[in-house]
Image (spheres, rainbow, N blue to C red):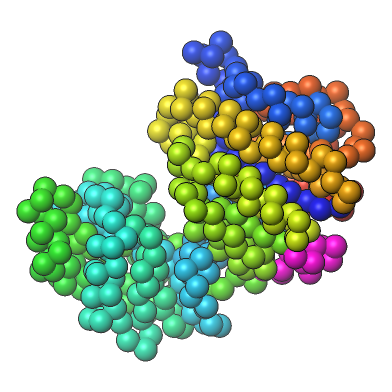
Amino acid sequence: MKHLIILGDGMADHPVSSLGGRTLLQAAHTPWMDLLARQGRCGRLVTVAPGFHPGSEVANLSVLGYDLPTVYEGRGSLEAASIGVDLMSGDMAMRCNLVCIEGDLLKNHSAGHITTEEADVLIRFLQERLGDGRVHFYTGVQYRHLLVIRGGDKRVDCTPPHDVPMKPFLPLMPKAKCLEAQATAGLLNSLILRSQDLLKEHPLNKQRIAQGKDPANSIWPWSPGYRPRMEPFSVRFPQVKRGAVITAVDLIRGIGRYAGLRRIDVPGATGLYDTNYEGKARAALDALRTDDFVYLHIEASDEAGHEGDVSLKMRTIEDLDRRVVGPIYEAVKDWSEPVGIAILPDHPTPCEVRTHTAEPVPFLIWYPGIVPDAVQTFDEVAACHGSYGLLKEDQFIHAFIND
Ligand SMILES: [Zn+2]
């Protein structure tokens, strides 16, 4: 049997009063997911282990059954893999935001949503002035870049800049958690301050200010880690000889790379509501013809949850159902080699809180011949009665691939 995971990022939610106390998955019109729930079996999965933050990288690693305390090395190392930077032993990778500082305050974490093209000019400039045998800057996407420090010590306390808008930045600078990390923390502090001196004079920033835009006048490195020690998916599951990941999100691409899943890019896959749903569904079907496992990740509902927009998030759920789940199920249900389908979110992004939460997520598993349980719809409430119960760690992926 081949296996397909369809992951709707942030799709789970809380009961919403304007929906009569129903969740969005309950209220949305999702005939295909409900059909698979009815013909398959449901359960719930803990995707955020105790002590971890409910980030998408954490939750997606959990869905794939990786042991977080063993493999989690922060965002930088995953984004490095996504942009093709191979980390050597001892290389410490960090997410390096371009941010906007105003006076003493960290005004925003995105330098006023700078474009990749403009950011690339600044990151190359910083590499030229601050880079050396030990320090290397790489351009990523928009405000999200990469800093690699050879021989860096990751035991440094760093603040995610999106958590501290309009806060004084000096007290939030990186701090060593132990004696051995003091040199790394000192280097990071000096890089931040030197970047500020260099960037404030850069013509591109002067031009941005003249245009009324926020200047990208500081770096902000955080989430330090080394190359993750992740066993390839095909080693953990020998029946999966070849697997693929389809996503518009760097972190998920990075996970896929370390997991040994080949990356499929779909034109028009944006990570937003206008994403190319049909293209992603087609790419998943194509991949299933040659591969044993496909991880299809769709970001749109998470973005709508962050915006707190209930009707937009409902639309993303209905789009996923009608434009992805339906066509894929219709195509594969009669294949001679059966295809198992699992559908789940990575974490809730409830519209009322507009950020990720760590509660267990509902999941469904369907394959030809599965003996259904009593669950009739796919949602957070019905899944509580699913026959898989509440799973954690690698129990979901084993139940899906090995059963
Ligand atoms: Zn997510």
From this view, report whether residue 89 is shown above or below residue 159: below
Q: Is residue 338 visible?
A: yes
Q: Which sits in the foreground, 274 or 317?
A: 274
Stretch of the chain drawn in magenta: 230-242
Residue 78 shown left or right of residue 162 in the figure: right
From this view, report whether residue 20 is shown above or below residue 77: above
Percent across and percent down for residue 72 are 59, 62
Percent across and percent down for residue 325 are 68, 36
Residue 96 is drawn in which quadrant? Answer: bottom left
Residue 159 is drawn in which quadrant? Answer: bottom left
Q: Main secondary structure of the magenta part?
A: loop
Residue that appears at 48% across and 75% down: 85
Residue 62 shown left or right of residue 10 in the figure: right
Residue that appears at 52% across and 78% down: 87
Residue that appears at 49% across and 49% down: 269
Q: Which sits in the foreground, 169 or 8?
A: 8
As drawn, the residue found furthest toward the bottom would be 133
Percent across and percent down for residue 374 are 85, 23
Residue 221 shown left or right of residue 55 in the figure: left
Residue that appears at 16% across and 50% down: 213
Q: Which sits in the foreground, 345 or 14?
A: 345
